[in-house]
Image (cartoon, coloured by chain):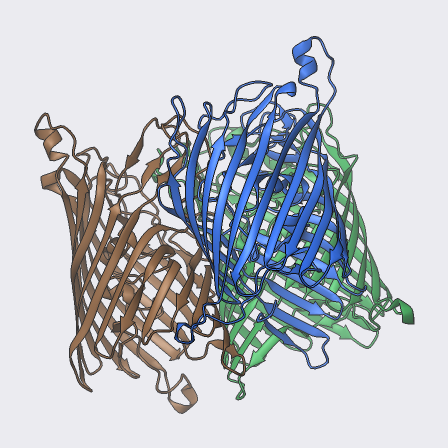
Chain colours: A brown, B green, C blue
Amino acid sequence: PKGRFTVSSEDGAYGFSVGLAFHEDFGGFLGAGPRSGETNGDFNSFTENARRVRIPFTFRYKDWVANVTPDFGAGGADGATSDQTLYEANLNYTGLHNTILTVGYFQPRVTEEDSESSNDFEMMERPAITDAVRKIAAGDARFSFGGLHYEKRWWIAAYFTGQSFGQRSGNASANTNNYGYNGIVNSQTGGTFRAAGRPYMSKDIDVHVGISAISAFKVAEVCKSGSASCSKSYGPSQSPEVNLTSTNLIGATINNASSVWSAGPELGFRWKKMVLKGEYYNIGVNRSNQPITGVTEAMSQKTVHLQGYYGSANYTLFGKGREYNIKEGAFSAPGVEHEFDPSHGYWGALEITGRYSVTDFSDVSADIRGGRQTVWSGGINWYPNRHFRFMLDFNHFIVSRTATDGGMSALTWNNAGRDGNSFAARVQAAF
Amino acid sequence: PKGRFTVSSEDGAYGFSVGLAFHEDFGGFLGAGPRSGETNGDFNSFTENARRVRIPFTFRYKDWVANVTPDFGAGGADGATSDQTLYEANLNYTGLHNTILTVGYFQPRVTEEDSESSNDFEMMERPAITDAVRKIAAGDARFSFGGLHYEKRWWIAAYFTGQSFGQRSGNASANTNNYGYNGIVNSQTGGTFRAAGRPYMSKDIDVHVGISAISAFKVAEVCKSGSASCSKSYGPSQSPEVNLTSTNLIGATINNASSVWSAGPELGFRWKKMVLKGEYYNIGVNRSNQPITGVTEAMSQKTVHLQGYYGSANYTLFGKGREYNIKEGAFSAPGVEHEFDPSHGYWGALEITGRYSVTDFSDVSADIRGGRQTVWSGGINWYPNRHFRFMLDFNHFIVSRTATDGGMSALTWNNAGRDGNSFAARVQAAF
Amino acid sequence: PKGRFTVSSEDGAYGFSVGLAFHEDFGGFLGAGPRSGETNGDFNSFTENARRVRIPFTFRYKDWVANVTPDFGAGGADGATSDQTLYEANLNYTGLHNTILTVGYFQPRVTEEDSESSNDFEMMERPAITDAVRKIAAGDARFSFGGLHYEKRWWIAAYFTGQSFGQRSGNASANTNNYGYNGIVNSQTGGTFRAAGRPYMSKDIDVHVGISAISAFKVAEVCKSGSASCSKSYGPSQSPEVNLTSTNLIGATINNASSVWSAGPELGFRWKKMVLKGEYYNIGVNRSNQPITGVTEAMSQKTVHLQGYYGSANYTLFGKGREYNIKEGAFSAPGVEHEFDPSHGYWGALEITGRYSVTDFSDVSADIRGGRQTVWSGGINWYPNRHFRFMLDFNHFIVSRTATDGGMSALTWNNAGRDGNSFAARVQAAF
């Protein structure tokens, strides 16, 4: 990005750059107490989280580029041991026109929300459904092999993917199962595909349409310490669209999963300084065939369908409105026309966002009851200059109960349903 | 600092720098064996520790500065999993004269010793009482919001603080307590204040006076795995002022703590190349009110008072003596007038230090018996040039026994008292 | 290395550089299934591993140099918690001719294979015996104190060594043993020595002879959680020369070890673009004397001898052949004469390698049955330019069974012997 520290050799053959993506959150929850029979979970009235502390290092020799980005703050719980420490580590070939071929730990982009840089997000967090979708076979530091190509009016990408970095850790202690091991003993393989375009564009209007698809062709097999058998399961779970808690109020564990796929449409519309967006995704979980002896068994073989959608509206009050970024096939952050300078009456840029997001991890027909979460949120973002940003988000979440069935257990902190509010702020620096 | 790698854009709007704080310790213990009934603890005859391996990255755009400093060697035990990996990650506004406003993970300075850069320390470690005081609500990578201001003759700072980075980790496993969680479920909030001044200064003399105050307004609530209840407790513990052991000979766990505060005076005096320093701190631990039914219960409600103090004398044998640093409100390291060059008879700079330090974590009137530690130490530091340093420290420590009472248990490695010696060396590079 | 980002002050007093060693592996196992009675172990048909993601930072002031190299991908299991995060952190004095004196966390080089940069390796992994030898008292991030000196025709180095970085972690929980601790309570001390020379050299021929020796004078004492006693043991174990598994098929735990040593000869021969190499090492494990009451006891006091050797042949098909690197006393990677540019018919450099490697961790005379592993491997490496490399390795491994005896237990994943194949690829960037 502009303003990133970069040096090149005189002949242009070599390039080296160091950047920064710094997101620090603080805030808390109000009226998020448990209902009768539930445990509290982790809902502080005030707490903080180093959401992203990434320092991207880029080494280029001619058309070959190596990216390594340590992340000193990844994840929802604030600490080194549970965090990844690596956001990406990959090799790229950029010798073909408007094309980037990549191999290594990468974040293959899928869904419009995930295609935006996290520095540009309208709200602090992605809608829960897009986060759930990308985690199937993409997400941060996912081993990937593939490429993207962009033109002025369309964007396309496809990747073959494996495990995420850090998911094989803990793979070293002997155990009493078939594998004699604890951890992932059979890695996931999967893939992502995304195509997006702008069927209509003008100075005042951008129409964005896209389709994203993702699949874990083979779900990872995991052995657990103290358990005699190993399992293939798919276990989506989501926080209430704010990462100041490590408690996920919705979540299901779908056992006996053989493959997982998801697909859905992306829609976006810009009119002057206003941007409207919406996406819908359906997640299908195929389960292995086993001999069927009764209704319960038959039910537990059914393909599970989870789903979610969101709609958002964003308006730039002052500053340059959000624009379409053809390299991402997605909208980017507002621009600052006049940097913060109160003595001259300049205040940078300011935008407001409203969002309605629904995520449903229940499929009653298949006896899966992982809960349904609705989040109403509103946010305001201030940009004193092009490198710094302050965000303020309010979320109201309404979550239906998780229940014991289909081989899964209810979450102790949500077995009666729950609602609540969060107030969160973010300070951000991006270079 | 001088000699740090720094690049700026031509117009001065952008700045980027990379530095280094590298402290590596080795050495061992002599005559630190256990008394009858005690376990050995961790007192190697020879071992080593990567005390600090920090690479500060600074990104500046005009008056806005982002600092990120990974630490690859933090802590007293040498290893990645128990360490923080992050020393600081914060945003600063420097647009006001001699003022720095900060938000993010930071080390808010409190006490004179903690106000010095660790590159400048007289001895390898802080006196135990100043380390205990700063850890109440400051210390490394503490979430902070506040500012400092300095002038030629005075220095003032105040911060609101939260948790330290990494203390929320492990927050993810379900449990049988009220929260259904393991880890910090209710974050700490606190604050720090420090004011310092130089009532008298001349070429040969500096008189330093200061006051430091710190408080955890609300102590963090922690749930432990396998325990049915969660607790708010304050648990100071300290090593014998050398970090080559992970055994802390003094330490108390004060249950039912509602808030913790500490305050005390700082005194310093420089005469030519000699620096004398002393500080005293009292730590008060308030405990929640509960119905009182007997003497024992009444005793367990009493406010606990812990305390400590130290005095040190330092003399620069050759080289430029220690000077007062107005940006820190504290003394800095000696200067090198002639860099190491034996062929010309130049030897860099050399200083010697003696220190007497007492830390008392017992308060018999409140039934708290965490032990009392006295450390006599002597050290010699050699600076071949301005970026490198070699330190040699000898400590003799005398520790009174910890005992079971007031809800706390004696430490198995110190239930009969203990004394011993340590020899430690440090190699240091600072850029 | 050439092409590393480096800046110096105008007078040459200061230097700062940032480099990269990026190795990312993927591939899997074929026909490596367990025999009857064995557990599977961790042999994926397809998986991946961030083998090395190192960013070396070098800070120089005149003849004094500080190196810090975080590693974001160290180890055989892919994840932050089990990894080191630090490859080296040391201080160096380079003021003497062709000599480097070092203190700090370092990789003291021992054996010809380990003396090569991992960027230059013929195959993806070292032969198992050289890895076992270096781990006795050297390996990555080992605390070291010593130096090396090189001339055009000879190379010599000796280091005193301690623990590796990260091995003291976990040292903090109380326990019921003598020490009241869990982890290393008595650090290892050891040393390394290596001398190498070129008795004959010409344009077409290099003859390399060397000797490497290493010893853990005092084996570390370790206390384990839940165990009443602490122990000194030596436990070599090795994967089948590919790091895509966390299962080691050969491995022994030799209890009651007092010291470990190893020594052996290095031979190398270059004729034009062909390089032949071979090394043999014997590992001796001395055990503490205890009163002897019978044959079994006497047997368990015997010195244990383990051993291994390898031979390899390498040929550069096109590009500049491997050359002798006098600074390492070892052979380096081929050079690229014409960078990859298919339009001009340029393809970079290409080399092939074959290797036969035997590692025997059994010593029947001392009742130690850790298995014997033979690996036949072949590989092909392509260098499109001097900074990037692609490797493809095939291994066929034949492993004899481990057995319960001499106080040790058989490995559950190898109690009947095992063989199998691996296919692995590596993408590499080095700056």
> Toward the viewer: B160 or C163?
C163
* Residue at the limit of the structure toward the top, as seen here: C294
Which residue shows up at 45% across the image and 62% down it?
A: A53
From what the image shows, is residue A229 above or below residue A245?
above
Which residue shows up at 66% across the image and 52% down it?
A: C269
Q: Position of residue A81 (x, y in %)?
A: 47, 47
Residue A22 seen from this side: yes
Residue C107 seen from this side: no
Q: Position of residue C39 (x, y in %)?
A: 40, 27
> Toward the viewer: C218 or C315?
C315
In the visual, does A260 lie left or right of A297? right
Q: How many marks?
A: 0
Q: Quadrant of the N terminus of chain A?
A: bottom left
> Toward the viewer: A139 or C156?
C156
In the visual, does A199 lie left or right of A344? left
* Residue at the limit of the structure toward the bottom, as seen here: A344
Q: Position of residue C68 (x, y in %)?
A: 62, 59
From what the image shows, is residue A215 above or below residue B112?
above
In the visual, does C236 lie left or right of B339? left
Which residue shows up at 58% across the image and 34% down it?
A: C359
Q: Quadrant of the C terminus of chain A?
A: bottom left
Q: Position of residue A419 (x, y in %)?
A: 22, 50
From what the image shows, is residue A50 above or below residue B183?
below
